[in-house]
Image (cartoon, rainbow, N blue to C red):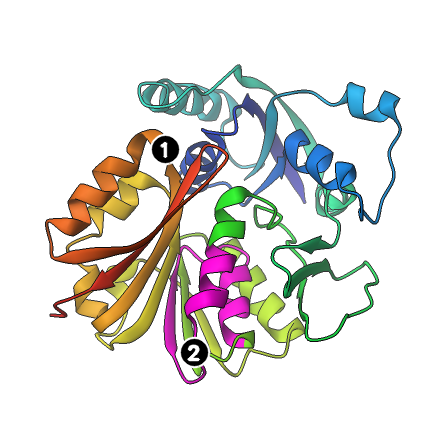
Amino acid sequence: MIWHEVRIKTTEEAYDAVTEMLTSIGAGGVAIEDPNDIISELSKPDSLDYADEEFLSSLEEAVTIKAYFSEEKNISELTSLIEEKLKFISQFLNVGEGFVGTSQVDDEDWSTSWKKYYKPLNLTDKLVIKPSWESYEKKNDEIVVEMDPGMAFGTGTHETTQMCSILLEKYVKPGDKVIDLGCGTGILSIIAAKLGAEAVTAVDIDEVAVKVAKENCAINGVDGKVSAFRGVIDDLKKEKADIIVANIIANVIIDISSKIPSYLKKDGLFVTSGIIKERSQEVLEAYTKLGFKCEQFEELGEWVAIVFRCLDSL
């Protein structure tokens, strides 16, 4: 099958919002190439890879997003729509250069092009993310999560994923019930399950992400604990969770604020990220007005993660 590959060059602060936009208008999958992730990993003293200065200097500063659309799409109409959506996002975030072009690729090219950017990563001292095609020797009590992003987006190296992982490691207790909103590749659902959660409900609006999440759960042996499906929070059964995690964007986090108490136990925790620093106060205000208590506030790079405690479940 032939796909339209749409290329966008954007910034670290905007790529989550741009990715969300692309999936919302029908992208069958999105690949992200963030040179900052590569440089950060290769620069670590214990990095598993080596790159010379020439390679590092060849990397661009911009984040490149490659989105894939069915060949049935009218490419002219599609690019016009994307440029219109980027203009809207630019009212709130610096989107950088924006749309830079299109090309056609087949399934095989798409499914392998991003692998060179994805290497084993220590999210925390205990949590390690390992691509399915890489070897890794487990140390002591490490929890190794094997991931194959496939045609879904993200590699697990983004600051928001790292912060959510650290917070889940801190707060998930054996027997907990967890909801993962906007599960993507399923990385946070798998982490929650491996940390001892009894049951995890993973939901995403992108059917490709849900498919990949299910595959990753099976690879990690937690498919008996994690139920993944396509949908939004309104599609969930009204069953109370101990923890809800949502690594999405500020607008959505604010929009769903009034719905969270219906799915969270009293004293339950809402762990959320995908929030740029400039929007953090809006998120704090939206939740504290509803009676949530800010339990923990973390910053990493340009991003914020917040843990809210639900003081009054509905």
| Quadrant in which the N terminus is drawn | top right
Residue type of the residue flagged with mark 2: Lys
Crowding at mark 1 (Cα within 10 Å: few <14, some 14-19, many 20+): some
Query: Residue 311 vs residue 60: left or right?
Result: left
- Specify the label residue 173 is tagged with: 2
Position in image of residue 224 (x %, y %): 52, 83
Q: Which residues are magenta?
A: 164-193
Q: Is residue 147 visible?
A: no
Tell me the CA gap for discs 1 and 2: 29 Å
Name the residue carrying label 1.
277
| Quadrant in which the C terminus is drawn | bottom left
Residue depicted at 39% across the width and 79% down the height? 176
Q: Earlier in the sequence, mark 1 or mark 2?
A: 2
Residue depicted at 48% across the width and 75% down the height? 226
Q: Is residue 191 magenta-colored?
A: yes
Residue depicted at 52% across the width and 24% down the height? 11
Q: Is residue 218 above or below residue 153?
A: below
Numbered disc 1: secondary structure: helix
Q: Is residue 162 above or below residue 143?
A: above
Q: Is residue 284 magenta-colored?
A: no
Numbered disc 2: secondary structure: loop
Crowding at mark 2 (Cα within 10 Å: few <14, some 14-19, many 20+): some
> Is the residue under label 2 in contact with that under label 1 (CB below 8 Å)?
no
Q: Is residue 296 above or below residue 222?
A: above
Position in image of residue 73 (x %, y %): 50, 33
Taking depth in this image into account, of 295 and 165 the one nearest to the observer is: 295
Count of numbered labels shown in the rendering: 2
